[in-house]
Image (cartoon, grey):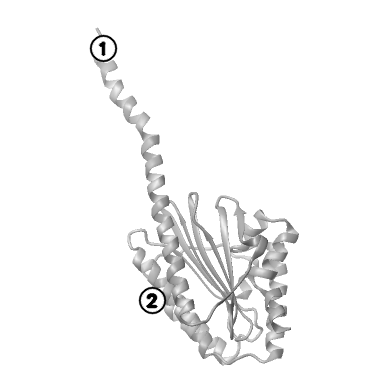
Amino acid sequence: MKSESGKKRKPIRAVIAGIPVLLAGLTVFLSLKNVQNADRAFRNGMGIVEGMYQLARRETGEFREINLKGLKKCSVDQFDMPGFGNLAILRTHAGLKQKTAFVMTPYEKKMPACTVEYTYFLWMSKADMEFCDLTGKEDSDGYKQAVMQLDKTCMNYYDIEEEQQASNWNDSFRALAVHKKLQKQDELRNQDMLCSVLSTYLNAAKAAATDSPEDTAQQLAAAESYSEQLLENGGGPADDIREALSRDQAQAFLSKVFFGTEAYRENMQ
């Protein structure tokens, strides 16, 4: 006759055996949900940009897809933004981590360069929004007005928790940096922040005075210098690129696609 304790162990063992199945199911569910959210960030962001600029797609060639560590394949799109500069978009939509990043580098406006990156990883999601000075003209009225407007827009989302960041070598380049822990229970709020920040940035760009050829040349040189420092020191999306590509490939990617300095110089010829 089996003991009572033996009978009790069977349900316990069944529960323990079922935990991996439940975790696997939860992981799949969260990943699928995150794919939807990352795709929504892409569609919303593109809607804002295309509503304000007539984009011209550029071929990204060998960099059309990059295998990033922990992110599987990352698709890369690049566009000319006539009257502004370069737009690069990085997207991953497979595996456990999903990401959508907009990188806008102005060469015809005295504006900070803009990186807005939404990352979804299981139940931990975040938004990194950085505006870096690559102009040397941060004291101009249009530039200061743009940063003030961006800061005000970001303050409207005080209810979304800030994520503390360690100090970094490129802090001195940052005119403004906002890092948020996205609210899982309110994705509409997360998406509204993305749209508001991009709208504020692009409206400020439209209002800013157009650069002189000398200012454009200075901004191109500044972007190239910053690109070299990113290769050496890392930071932001460049960390993934440095891990995925050789140094020569990473340098070519940053120049041709990410910042688009090489592509922009071709347009000037």
Kindly identify the amino acid type of the residue bearing the numbered disc 1.
Ser
Q: State the residue at coordinates (42%, 76%).
A: 196
Relative horizontal placement of residue 99, taking residue 28 as reference (left or right)? right
Q: Please name the residue shown 35% across and 32% down the image.
A: 18
Element type at mark 1: loop
**Which mark sits nearer the N-terminus, 1 or 2?**
1
The reply to whether dot 1 and dot 2 touch (C-beta < 8 Å) is no
Q: Is residue 55 left or right of residue 159?
A: right
Q: Position of residue 100 (x, y in %)?
A: 50, 63
Classify mark 1: residues with Cα within 10 Å, few (<14), some (14-19) or many (20+): few
Q: Residue at x 60, y 88 (%)?
A: 139
**Residue 16 screen position, x and y as percent:** 36, 30
| Marker disc for residue 3 | 1
Question: Which quadrant, please, contains the C terminus?
Answer: bottom right
208 versus 74 height, above or below: below
Above or below residue 262? Residue 211 is below
The residue to which callout 2 is attached is 156
Amino acid type of the residue that numbered disc 2 sits on in the rendered structure: Asn
